[in-house]
Image (cartoon, coloured by chain):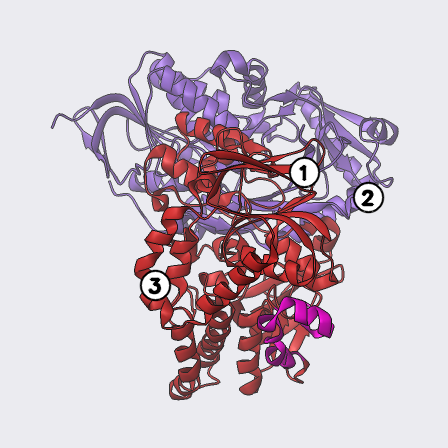
C-alpha cells in the first residue's frame, strides 16, 4: 500500500494537467494517473513527441497544449502514465494497474478528469471491420502519424468531423467523401443560441475555417444525409445514404464516424453519484457544485467528464476543481482559493458561452438516437434495437433489466458503448422521460483487470 | 375506497416470496406479494445460481433433497427451464487434512442415511477437471446437482405466480403491521392491505417484521460478492468449491467464468445498496490462481454484491411466528437459499393450509436463539412498526 496522497488526479487531458498545475503551484505533491503512455489527453495526445510537421498538420489548437504539458516535469508531481484506473471507491481509494501490477492508493481528494467519449452512432453496418470513430482515427494520426492515404469516408456530425477532415486534407490524404448528417432544422434550432455564441467568437471562426478548407479541397461533401448504411461482406466497402430523397453510394475502405462527444461517466456512475439528464447535450452529467465537487466529500469531477465543455473550458474547470480540493484539504484558505480562481472562473464562463449553440447545432440525427430495429446496439453481446424494444413490450422498465432479458451491457465494455442508446430506446418505447428510465448500474472494474493482477493487489491497510 | 382483501400478504417478492405466493395461489388462495423494489433486485437475482446439495447443513438435508426433485422438473413447475443445467458439484481437498475433514463428513452423512456425496481420488478429480492444479489430493462429488440462472429463475417464478393469480406490487414496501379483524393489516405507500395471513419473506430485511412482533433474530446483512470474467473456451463442466477456501467457481455455457465464494463487500441495507470490496475479490482471485494457475491472464469484466441475511448458525428461519397467529417467516437463508426456494414455498403453503409440513423444519424455528445472541446482534434502523 502506497501512503495516502493528499490529491489524486485521474487523467492528464486539459482538466487534469491544469489541476496538476494548481497543485504544484500550491506545493502539494499530487499523484497524476493516466491510462495513456504520454500526458495530454485526447486533444494533446503525444504532443510532447510530435514532429514539427505533424504539429503543423494537426493545427494550432493542438500545439497550444505545450505550456500545460510542462507541469509533467515538476519535481513534486508524481506522474504515472500507463496507469489504468479500474475502480474508485467513495472513500477515495483508487485502484489501478500499472506495468502488470494492481495497486490501491488512498487519497484525501480525488479529481476525476476522465474526459469525454464519442457518442455511439449505431446504424446498419456500423460494426463492420474498417468502420471506426473519428476519435480513433485521430488517435492514429496524433500518436503514430498514421492515416489512410485514400479511400476514407467521414460520416456524421459535429466539430470533430470537420476538424478531422481538415487535418486529413492538410496531411494530403485523398478523402472519398464527407457525409454530414446534421439535420437541416438543427441550423434553425441553433439560431436562437447564436448571439450567446458570438460573445466568444473563436469557435465559430475556427468552424468557418474548417468549412472553407473542406469546400476548397474538392472532396465531395454531402450535407443533410440520412438513412446511412455501411455495406461490405468481411469489411466495409462503401456507404449508402440519402440526401433529399436521392440515394447515393460511395465506395470506401475506411469509414470514420462521429456523432459528437458525451461525458465519460463510467466512474462517476460506478461511484453511485447522482446524474441529471442534459436535454440539450442529450447525455448524463454528474451533479457537481461550482468547484466540480460531488456529493461525496472526497470526490470531484473536472472537465468534459462533468459535462461537455471543450478543451479551454476544461482547463479552467480543472483549475477550479483543484483549488476547491486544495481548500478542502486545508492547504488554501477560502480567500486564497477564490483569489486564485478568479482568472479561471472568468475563462470558464467565457469558454462555455458557445456550448448551447454547438450542442443544438450538432444534436444527433434521430436515426442514431432511435436506431432501426435490426441495428446492433450492444456490440459486445450483439443485441439489436428491436430486441430492446421487445423487452419493453415484455415489461422491461430500464437498462438494468435489459441485462436479465438479453445480456445487453454485460460485455467487457460494461455498457459504455450502448448505454445511452439503450436508455433512449427504452424511454421512447415506454413514452416516459429519460430520467425515469435511468442508466446502467456500472459495476467495477470499469476497465477489465486480470485475475493475476487482482490476486497481487496491494491492499490498503483498512480495506 | 374499498380496501382489497387477501387471504395472504407475502412481504418480499424475491425468489422465496414468489415461491410462497405461487404455492399459495395454487392452493386456491388470493395472494398479494409486495416488494419494496422489484423481484430479483437483491440476493434472489444476483446470486451464483448454485443448485447444490453438496456440503449442506444437516438440518437442511431433507429440504435440499426435496428441492432438487422440483429442480429436475422445474419446467413443469414454473413453465421455464430457469436455465437449470444438471451437473456435478465438486469440493476439492488441497491437503491430507482437508481430505480427512471431508471424509469425516461423508461418514456422518452415511450415518444419517445419505449417500449423495461421494469421495473421488486425485486421478478421478483430474479426469473430471483436467485443468485443476496438480497439488489437489481428491474431492467430494455430488452428482445430479446443477446450476441455474438466478434472474431468469426469478422471472419464471414471477410469471408463474402472476398466471396463478398472484398480484405483485413493486416499489411497495411494508411500512407497518397491525392486527385487523381476524387477520392482519399491512400499511404500504399504496395504501393499507388486509390479509388473513402474512408471510415474511423479506430476506435481509426480514428482521424488521420479526422485531415488530417481538421476536427478533440475530440476522445480519452481508454483501456477498461475485465476479465474472471474459469468455473462454469451455474447460470446466462441474461447479467447483474448495474445502479449505471459500469458493464457488463455474463456467457458463457462454464461456464466462463465475467466481464467488462468500467474500463480503460493504452492506448498506438502510440505503438499499451494497458495494464490492476489492480486498475480498483479490482473495477470490488468489484462490482461483492457486487452483487454476493458467487463468492468471483472464480478464475480470464485472463484479457485484448482493444483499443477503446471515444467521449465526448458518441456517434460515422457516416456520410460524412464535408470537402471533397468522404470521409465517422464511428469511435469513445465509447465502445458500437459491436451491431451497422451490421447496420453501411448498412448506409455507402446507403450514398455512394444512397446519404442518411433511418436512422437518423444527431446526429453523424463529425462537431458537437465546437472549445472549440477541444482545450481540446489530440493530439496523427499524423500519416497520406493529
Verify whether residue B351 appears in magenta.
no
Query: Circle 1 sits on which residue?
Result: A236
Rendered image quadrant of residue A334: bottom left
User: CB atoms at circles 3 and 2 under 8 Å apart?
Assistant: no
- What's the chain of the residue with tag 1? A
Counting from the top left corner in percent of width and height, residue B104 is at 74, 32
Q: Which chain is purple?
A: B
For the record, the magenta segment spans A44-72
Q: Main secondary structure of the magenta part?
A: helix
Counting from the top left corner in percent of width and height, residue A237 is at 68, 37
Looking at the rendered structure, whether the residues under marks 3 and 1 are on a common chain is answered as yes
Quadrant where the C terminus of chain A sits is bottom right
- What's the chain of the residue with tag 2? B
Label 2: few (<14), some (14–19) or many (≥20) C-alpha neighbours in 10 Å: some
Query: Circle 3 sits on which residue?
Result: A194
- Which residue occupies 60% across, 81% down? A67
Q: Which mark is residue B294?
A: 2
Q: Is residue B271 left or right of residue A462?
A: left
Q: Vertically, is B184 above or below B267?
A: above
Counting from the top left corner in percent of width and height, residue A303 is at 49, 67
Question: Under tag 1, what secondary structure?
Answer: loop
Q: Is residue A203 left or right of residue B148?
A: left
Question: Under tag 3, what secondary structure?
Answer: helix
Q: Nearer the viewer, residue A147 or A323?
A: A147
Rendered image quadrant of residue B96: top right
Amino acid at each position: 500500500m502506497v501512503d495516502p496522497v493528499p490529491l489524486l488526479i485521474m487523467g492528464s487531458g486539459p482538466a487534469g494537467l491544469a489541476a496538476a498545475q494548481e497543485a504544484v503551484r500550491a506545493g502539494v505533491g499530487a499523484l497524476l494517473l493516466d491510462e495513456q503512455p504520454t500526458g495530454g489527453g485526447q486533444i494533446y495526445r503525444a504532443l510532447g513527441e510530435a514532429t514539427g510537421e505533424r504539429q503543423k498538420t494537426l493545427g494550432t489548437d493542438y500545439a497550444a497544449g505545450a505550456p500545460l504539458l510542462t507541469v509533467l516535469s515538476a519535481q513534486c508531481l508524481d506522474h504515472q502514465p500507463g496507469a489504468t484506473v479500474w475502480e474508485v471507491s467513495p472513500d477515495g481509494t483508487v485502484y489501478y494497474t500499472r506495468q502488470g501490477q494492481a495497486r490501491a492508493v488512498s487519497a484525501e481528494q480525488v479529481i476525476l478528469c476522465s474526459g469525454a467519449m464519442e457518442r455511439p452512432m449505431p446504424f446498419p453496418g456500423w460494426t463492420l471491420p474498417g468502420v471506426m470513430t473519428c476519435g480513433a482515427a485521430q488517435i492514429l494520426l496524433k500518436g503514430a502519424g498514421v492515416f489512410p492515404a485514400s479511400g476514407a469516408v467521414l460520416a456524421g456530425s459535429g466539430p470533430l468531423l470537420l476538424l478531422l477532415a481538415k487535418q486529413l486534407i492538410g496531411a494530403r490524404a485523398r478523402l472519398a467523401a464527407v457525409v454530414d448528417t446534421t439535420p437541416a432544422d438543427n441550423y434553425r434550432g441553433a439560431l436562437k443560441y447564436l448571439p450567446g455564441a458570438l460573445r466568444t467568437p473563436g469557435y465559430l471562426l475556427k468552424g468557418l475555417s474548417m468549412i472553407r478548407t473542406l469546400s476548397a479541397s474538392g472532396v465531395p461533401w454531402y450535407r443533410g444525409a440520412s438513412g446511412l448504411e455501411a455495406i461490405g461482406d468481411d469489411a466495409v466497402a462503401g456507404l449508402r445514404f440519402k440526401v433529399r430523397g436521392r440515394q447515393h453510394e460511395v465506395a470506401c475502405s475506411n469509414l470514420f464516424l462521429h456523432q459528437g462527444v458525451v461525458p465519460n461517466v463510467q466512474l462517476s456512475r460506478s461511484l453511485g453519484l447522482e446524474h441529471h439528464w442534459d436535454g440539450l447535450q442529450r447525455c448524463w452529467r454528474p451533479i457537481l457544485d461550482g468547484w466540480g465537487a460531488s456529493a461525496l466529500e472526497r470526490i470531484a469531477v473536472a472537465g468534459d467528464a462533468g459535462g461537455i465543455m471543450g478543451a479551454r473550458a476544461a482547463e479552467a474547470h480543472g483549475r477550479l476543481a483543484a483549488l476547491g480540493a486544495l481548500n478542502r484539504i486545508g492547504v488554501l484558505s477560502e480567500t486564497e482559493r477564490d483569489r486564485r480562481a478568479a482568472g479561471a472562473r472568468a475563462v470558464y464562463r467565457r469558454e462555455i458561452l458557445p456550448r448551447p449553440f454547438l450542442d443544438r447545432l450538432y444534436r444527433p440525427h434521430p436515426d442514431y438516437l432511435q436506431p432501426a430495429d435490426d441495428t446492433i446496439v450492444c456490440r459486445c453481446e450483439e443485441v439489436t434495437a428491436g430486441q430492446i424494444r421487445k423487452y419493453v413490450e415484455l415489461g422491461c422498465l430500464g437498462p438494468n433489466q435489459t441485462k436479465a432479458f438479453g445480456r445487453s451491457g454485460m460485455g467487457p465494455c460494461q455498457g459504455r458503448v450502448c448505454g445511452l442508446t439503450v436508455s433512449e430506446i427504452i424511454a421512447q418505447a415506454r413514452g416516459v422521460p429519460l430520467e425515469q428510465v435511468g442508466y446502467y448500474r456500472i459495476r467495477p472494474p470499469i476497465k477489465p483487470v486480470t485475475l493475476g493482477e487482482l490476486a497481487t493487489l496491494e491492499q490498503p491497510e483498512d480495506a | 375506497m374499498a380496501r382489497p382483501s387477501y387471504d395472504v400478504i407475502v412481504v418480499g417478492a424475491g425468489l422465496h416470496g414468489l415461491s410462497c405466493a405461487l404455492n399459495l395461489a395454487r392452493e386456491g388462495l388470493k395472494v398479494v406479494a409486495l416488494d419494496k423494489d422489484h423481484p430479483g433486485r437483491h440476493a434472489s437475482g444476483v446470486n451464483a445460481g448454485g443448485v447444490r446439495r453438496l456440503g449442506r447443513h444437516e438440518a437442511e438435508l431433507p429440504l435440499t433433497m426435496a428441492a432438487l426433485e422440483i429442480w429436475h422438473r422445474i419446467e413443469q413447475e414454473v413453465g421455464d427451464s430457469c436455465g437449470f443445467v444438471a451437473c456435478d458439484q465438486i469440493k476439492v481437498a488441497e491437503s491430507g487434512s482437508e481430505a480427512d475433514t471431508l471424509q469425516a463428513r461423508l461418514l456422518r452423512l452415511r450415518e444419517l442415511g445419505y449417500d449423495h456425496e461421494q469421495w473421488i481420488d486425485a486421478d478421478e478429480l483430474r479426469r473430471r477437471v483436467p485443468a485443476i492444479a496438480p497439488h489437489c489430493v481428491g474431492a467430494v462429488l455430488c452428482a445430479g446437482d446443477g446450476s441455474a440462472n438466478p434472474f431468469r429463475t426469478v422471472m419464471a417464478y414471477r410469471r408463474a405466480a402472476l398466471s396463478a393469480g398472484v398480484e405483485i406490487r413493486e416499489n411497495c414496501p411494508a411500512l407497518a403491521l397491525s392486527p385487523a379483524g381476524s387477520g392482519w393489516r399491512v400499511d404500504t405507500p399504496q395504501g393499507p392491505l388486509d390479509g388473513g395471513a402474512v408471510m415474511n419473506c423479506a430476506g435481509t430485511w426480514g428482521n424488521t417484521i420479526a422485531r415488530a412482533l417481538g421476536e427478533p433474530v440475530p440476522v445480519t446483512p452481508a454483501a456477498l460478492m461475485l465476479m465474472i470474467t471474459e469468455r473462454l473456451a469451455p474447460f470446466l463442466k462441474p461447479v467447483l468449491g474448495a474445502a479449505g477456501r471459500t469458493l464457488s467457481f463455474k463456467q457458463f455455457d457462454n464461456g464466462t467464468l463465475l467466481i464467488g465464494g462468500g467474500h463480503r463487500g460493504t452492506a448498506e441495507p438502510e440505503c438499499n445498496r451494497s458495494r464490492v470490496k476489492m480486498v475480498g475479490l483479490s482473495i477470490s482471485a488468489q484462490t482461483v490462481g492457486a487452483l487454476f494457475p493458467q487463468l492468471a491472464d483472464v480478464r475480470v469484466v464485472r463484479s457485484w454484491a448482493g444483499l443477503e441475511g446471515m444467521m449465526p448458525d448458518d441456517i434460515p428461519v422457516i416456520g410460524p411466528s412464535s408470537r402471533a397467529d397468522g404470521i409465517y417467516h422464511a428469511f435469513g437463508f445465509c447465502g445458500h437459499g437459491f436451491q431451497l426456494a422451490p421447496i420453501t414455498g411448498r412448506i409455507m403453503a402446507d403450514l398455512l393450509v394444512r397446519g404442518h409440513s411433511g418436512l422437518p423444519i423444527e431446526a429453523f424455528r424463529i425462537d431458537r436463539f437465546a437472549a445472549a445472541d440477541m444482545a450481540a446482534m446489530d440493530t439496523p434502523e427499524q423500519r416497520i412498526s406493529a
